């Protein structure tokens, strides 16, 4: 919105967190001429009855959409960055056993586990 167009309504997207530790989720949108009123409307709509502990209010035009699969899925094989197939627990156990510092097995409480 330009300063020359006061009062023109814009869409503002509202993201909310219902309780501490929860992720932010899209709650909906409000129409407002500026950020100050958008925050006020969002507070009235999404936290008036204490159903939110945190709000983000973002002008819809400021959200950038990225849906190009060529950009989201790079063509290079980067499997070396994934930890699959590399089990550190087994390597540590083998090193401890080799050095004579093997950890005693934990008692699981099952019959015959002793």
Image (tube, rainbow, N blue to C red):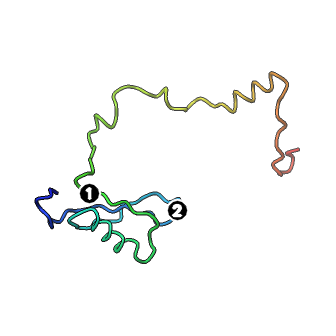
Give the quarter of the image for residue 41: bottom left
Q: Which quarter of the image is occupied by the C terminus? A: top right
Vertical position of residue 96 compared to residue 8: above or below: above
**Residue 32: assigned label:** none
Depth order, front residue of 42/101: 42
| Residue at the extreme front of the image, as rendered | 3
Indicate which disc, 1 or 2, sits on the residue closer to the N terminus: 2
Return the residue at label 1: 59
Residue drawn where x is 55% and y is 32% of the image: 83
Q: Quadrant of the N terminus?
A: bottom left
Residue holding disc 2: 20
Reply above or below: 7 against 81: below
Q: Which quadrant of the figure has residue 70?
A: top left
Residue drawn 86% across and 50% down?
Answer: 111
- For this orientation, the residue located farthest to the right is 114
- Residue 94 x, y percent position in the rendering: 75, 26
Residue sitting at x 23%, y 67%: 31
Q: Position of residue 71 (x, y in %)?
A: 30, 35
Q: Residue furthest left?
A: 4
User: Against 91, is 5 above or below?
Assistant: below
Q: Residues within 10 Å of mark 1 (few under 14, many from 20)?
A: some
Q: Secondary structure at mark 1?
A: strand
Seen from the viewer's position, the closer of residues 41 and 80 is 41
Relative to 48, residue 30 above or below: above
Residue lying at the far top in this picture: please name it: 98
């Amino acid at each position: 919105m330009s300063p020359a167009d006061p009062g023109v309504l814009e869409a503002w997207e509202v993201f909310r967190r219902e309780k501490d530790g929860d992720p932010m989720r899209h709650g909906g949108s409000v129409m407002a001429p500026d950020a100050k009123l958008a925050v006020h409307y969002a507070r009235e709509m999404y936290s008036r009855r204490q159903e939110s502990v945190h709000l983000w209010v973002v002008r819809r035009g400021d959200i950038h959409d990225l849906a190009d699969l060529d950009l989201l899925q790079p063509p290079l094989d980067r499997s070396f960055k994934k930890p699959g197939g590399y089990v550190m627990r087994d390597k540590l156990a083998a090193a401890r056993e080799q050095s004579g510092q093997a950890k005693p097995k934990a008692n699981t409480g099952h019959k015959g586990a002793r």
